[in-house]
Image: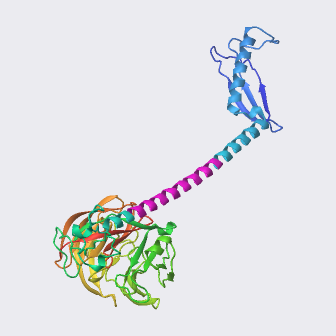
Amino acid sequence: MWLLLSVCVFCLLGCSEGQDRATLWRGNDHSGRCQYTFTVPSPSETSCSPTVSGGPEMEGLKARLSLLEVLVARLTGGEIGGPGAGSQSQAGLQEALTQAMGERILLQGEKERLERDVEGLQRRMEEMRRETERLQSRPCYPQPPLLPPSIPLQDSGLRPAGDPAWQYGGNPVLQELKAEVTEIPAPSPEGPEDSTGCGELISIGEPVSHRKADSIAGKYGVWMQDPEAVAPYGGKMVWRIDTVGSEVRQLFGYEDMDQLSKGFPSKVLLLPEPVESTGATLYRGSLYYQRRRSRTLLRYDLVSESIAARRDLPHAGFHGQFPYSWGGYTDVDLGVDEQGLWAVYSTNKAKGAIVVSQLDPHSLAVKRSWETSIRKTSVANAFVICGRLYTVASYTAPNTTINFMFDTATGQGKEVALPFRNKYRYNSMVDYNHAQRKLFAWDNFHIVSYDVRLGRQ
């Protein structure tokens, strides 16, 4: 852009002493160029003489004009430099931006590589930990004492005299001593379990990770093994549902835990109606789940791959009315224990308190219900063991507790404080599997399990 400076010096008549401020106008001339016009009053003259050629007044005016030119250069921000300077600056900025983007891509690749290395190390550490536990659990057999070669076995008392089984060409050799080991379980401080294997929950082990979900759809989910499986699927079959999305209908099946950890499903079923949240469960060859945006319960038969039963859960809140504290439309939570099929939910009549009902596994009819004293939105999750309802205090705290227990046999509840770990700090599903004697959980993309210990009934 061309800049035309036209400085018109008007020696204004009637200017008072001390009025030496300059006035600036900016506008386009008749050819469209930017034109700045200044008016600078004289500090001493009241009128302009015919010839102004020198003197101290002229020198002062020149100095003032120089200052004004510097001011104009700053205001225009480099326009005086012409179009060439602007294009050079733009090219420099583009080059810097390209370099920064390249460095960002390199750093992102390095970050992903480090994350893969960390995951590999974690898997290796977990394998080493399991191997250590396996080795520690092996029984130690007593070893015979080593005898000097000069002492014959017969004389030492380790070899029966005249026993032909110990004669090998007359050369005495040491034989392995074998002993039968009978394991006697240590008595529980809370008393022994009853004949059904039931008892009150005493402790929960550390979480064991089995697999991490592949995509954002697996941030929340539910995974299951049928505790009373029927043909053609056995008890080792693992089922999984990723529950992030508006139309959750895929059920993935894996032959065993090893195939789950590798991510190789052997069966993928498309459910006829969408799933609501993480409250599904498996029992005797059927998948039980809540239909999306409704209080309707469905029983999906895995063999016929069709809906075998449906029924509304009476007065149950749904789609965000009475969820767990983490949300996720977890209004209805289904589970299985030694006594059968259960539903954990709330109603308007209960004013948000947890209601636990035992269901008929064939027709889904409510057999009996209990209303507890703990609000459903105040706990992170719940599960049933041996007819007792247990609640989890937090879904994000790494070290939280099982904070409440309600016994359906007595109709009484009480506060408890059993340590529980959220290893990945966003636990969206906790269910009990009585065949495995474990808790199954889905913690922030991770499929995990916990060993449990039960006391006396």
Q: How are the colours assigned in the image?
A: rainbow
Where on the picture, by quarter, is residue 221?
A: bottom left
Q: Which sits in the foreground, 30 or 13? A: 30
x 30%, y 88%: residue? 360
Label total for image: 0
Q: Position of residue 316 (x, y in %)?
A: 32, 79
The quadrant of the image that shows the C terminus is bottom left
Assign the magenta stretch its main secondary structure.
helix
Question: Image check: 363 left or right of 44?
Answer: left
Q: Is residue 10 above or below residue 329?
A: above
Where on the picture, by quarter, is residue 448?
A: bottom left
Where on the picture, by quarter, is residue 65?
A: top right
The quadrant of the image that shows the N terminus is top right
Q: Which sits in the foreground, 184 or 32? A: 184
Of all residues, the one furthest to the top in this rendering is: 55
| Residue 126 painted magenta | yes
Q: Position of residue 202 (x, y in %)?
A: 22, 68
| Residue 69 painted magenta | no
Q: Position of residue 43 (x, y in %)?
A: 68, 14
x 34%, y 58%: residue? 398
Of all residues, the one furthest to the front in this rendering is: 170
The reply to whether residue 351 is visible in this rendering is: no
Q: Position of residue 35 (x, y in %)?
A: 77, 32
Q: Is residue 395 above or below residue 63?
A: below
Q: What segment carries the magenta color?
A: 102-129
The reply to whether residue 8 is visible in this rendering is: yes
Q: Which sits in the foreground, 254 or 242? A: 254
Q: Is residue 142 above or below residue 46?
A: below
